[in-house]
Structures are given as C-alpha cells and as structure tokens.
Image (cartoon, rainbow, N blue to C red):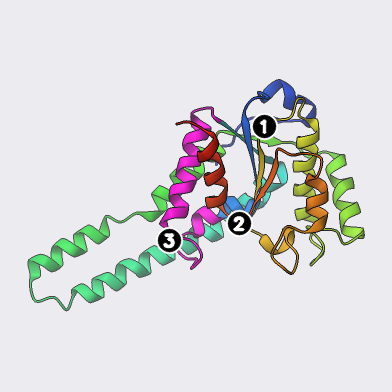
C-alpha cells in the first residue's frame, strides 16, 4: 500500500507548513477502518468521519503523519484484518441469500439477491485507507525514539504503565519528538489512537504521565475516538 514521503525529524520544518493542523496516526486507528463492520463499538458514522478526515488531508487543510513503526505494524496486520473483512462480507451475503429463499415471489427474491451480490464493503474501506496513507508523511526511525521507549518501559510509564509495550512507547515518543521539533508549533497537533487503556488511568481520564507530556504544549491533543478527532477538525476548519 502506497504511503507518502519518508522524512527524518530534522526535515519536519522544511516539509510541514507550521500553520497547518496535524494528525499523527497510531496503528490501531488505521486498522480500525477495516474493522468497522465487525466491531460493536464502530459503525457507519465512524467511516464517515474517516472519509471526511481524508477530504481534509487531500484538500491540504490537514497534514497527516505517522511513524515508520506504525506503517510496519499496519502492514504486518493488514492481510489478517482484510481476510476477516472478506469473511464477514461473505457471511452477510449468504445470510441474506438464505432469508431471501423464503420469499414467495421469485422476481423479488432475484432482485434482492442481485442487489446483495453487488455489495462490496471492502472497496469502500480500502479506498479511504489508501486516500489517507498515500498522503501521509512517514517519520523514519531514529535512536532517540528507542531511547524514549526504553526509559518509559523501564519506569512503567504510560503508555507502558499497564503492560510493558515497547512499540506503544516508541510511537508515542515519535509523536512527542515531532511536537518538540515543530518551530513554531502547529495550532493543532492531534495523536489519534483507539488503545484507550494504554493512555488512560483507572477513571478513564488521560493518564497523568500523558498529561505531563502535553502540559507545556497547549496545541497537543490526544484523541481516543475518530469521531472526537473529526469533531475538533470540523469546528476549526472551513470546508
């Protein structure tokens, strides 16, 4: 799957206009696009949010960026999630076919079956994924992100407070490094993840470690749902 330009942290200010809003993708937020038909906590409104965000990116109203590690993780899981999606689509079609068999009118049954056979959820989901990824800058891996992840892991700091997840720390460290590298900082820089447990405390609020990271950067946001991200963008941007 095609992605945007790969850059080093030192190139950020040459490549990203400082007056643009920025979204930084976690792996799960991208994979969730393929999971929309299967997850009870996701629905068509989430897909519409992803599509509107893709519009903002393509219209140069929003800069999309992520870590090289995110792309590697995404590609590692893409085939599995894609196959699950195809399986769900096939089962859904067969179920409707089975119900249609009970219809008395052959013509009505044929119309329903023919319409269902045209259903292609996969195409729409892959389309929005491609629209986002092909316009997404990829931050190349650097030692400073590894150092950050090592420190958070050793000290059991979020996003490794609940479980020792090195990759989550690495990705969060990449985002933090991006924010600090922007000069001047963008008016809005959002980190979008759906791994809420890694970034929140037992009360469901952002973990104090994450809050401390954001304390001196008022334009930083951590969004745990794509709808929340889209809501922010819609209130700021004029389409």
Tell me the number on the disc at residue 187: 1
What residue appears at the point 63 percent right and 55 percent down from the top-left corner?
A: 224
Q: Position of residue 35 (x, y in %)?
A: 50, 60
Percent of width and height locating residue 175: 74, 42
Q: At 19% across and 73% down in the image, what residue appears?
A: 100
Which residue is painted at 64% across and 25% down in the image? 19
Per the image, the residue denoted by label 2 is: 77
Label 1 to label 3, Cα distance in Å?
A: 40 Å
The quadrant holding residue 139 is top right
Q: Nearer the viewer, residue 113 or 57?
A: 57
**Which x, y percent locates residue 93?**
31, 66
**Residue identified by numbered label 3:** 86
What segment is highlighted magenta in the picture? 32-61
Q: Secondary structure at mark 3?
A: helix
Within 10 Å of the Cα at label 1, are there few (<14), some (14-19), or many (20+) other Cα atoms?
A: few
Q: Is residue 203 left or right of residue 28?
A: right
Residue 2 image label: none
Q: Is residue 93 above or below residue 235?
A: below
Of mark 2 and mark 1, the one earlier in the sequence is 2
Asked if the residue at tag 1 contacts the one at tag 2, i.e. Cβ–Cβ closer than 8 Å, the answer is: no
Which mark's residue is nearer the viewer, 1 or 3? Answer: 1
Helix, strand or loop for disc 1: loop
- The quarter of the rendered structure image containing the C terminus is top left
Disc 2 and disc 3: Cα gap in Å?
15 Å
Q: CA distance from mark 2 to mark 1?
A: 33 Å
Residue at the image point whose x is 7% and y is 72% from the top: 105
Q: Is residue 138 magenta?
A: no
């Amino acid at each position: 799957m095609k992605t945007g330009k790969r850059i080093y942290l030192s190139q950020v200010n040459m490549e990203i206009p400082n007056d643009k809003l920025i979204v930084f993708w976690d792996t799960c937020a991208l994979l969730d696009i393929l999971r929309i038909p299967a997850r009870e906590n996701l629905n068509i409104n989430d897909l519409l949010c992803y599509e509107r965000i893709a519009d903002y990116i393509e219209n140069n109203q929003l800069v999309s960026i992520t870590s090289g590690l995110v792309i590697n993780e995404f590609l590692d899981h893409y085939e599995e999630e894609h196959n699950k999606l195809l399986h769900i689509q096939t089962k859904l079609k067969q179920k409707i076919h089975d119900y249609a068999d009970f219809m008395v009118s052959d013509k009505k049954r044929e119309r329903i079956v023919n319409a269902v056979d045209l259903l292609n959820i996969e195409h729409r989901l892959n389309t929005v994924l491609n629209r986002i990824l092909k316009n997404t800058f990829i931050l190349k891996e650097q030692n400073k992100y590894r150092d950050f992840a090592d420190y958070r892991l050793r000290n059991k700091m979020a996003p490794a407070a609940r479980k020792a997840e090195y990759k989550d720390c690495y990705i969060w460290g990449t985002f933090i490094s991006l924010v600090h590298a922007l000069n001047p900082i963008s008016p809005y820089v959002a980190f979008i993840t759906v791994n809420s447990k890694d970034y929140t405390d037992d009360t469901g609020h952002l973990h104090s470690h994450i809050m401390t990271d954001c304390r001196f950067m008022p334009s930083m946001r951590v969004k745990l749902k794509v709808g929340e991200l889209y809501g922010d963008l819609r209130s700021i941007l004029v389409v």
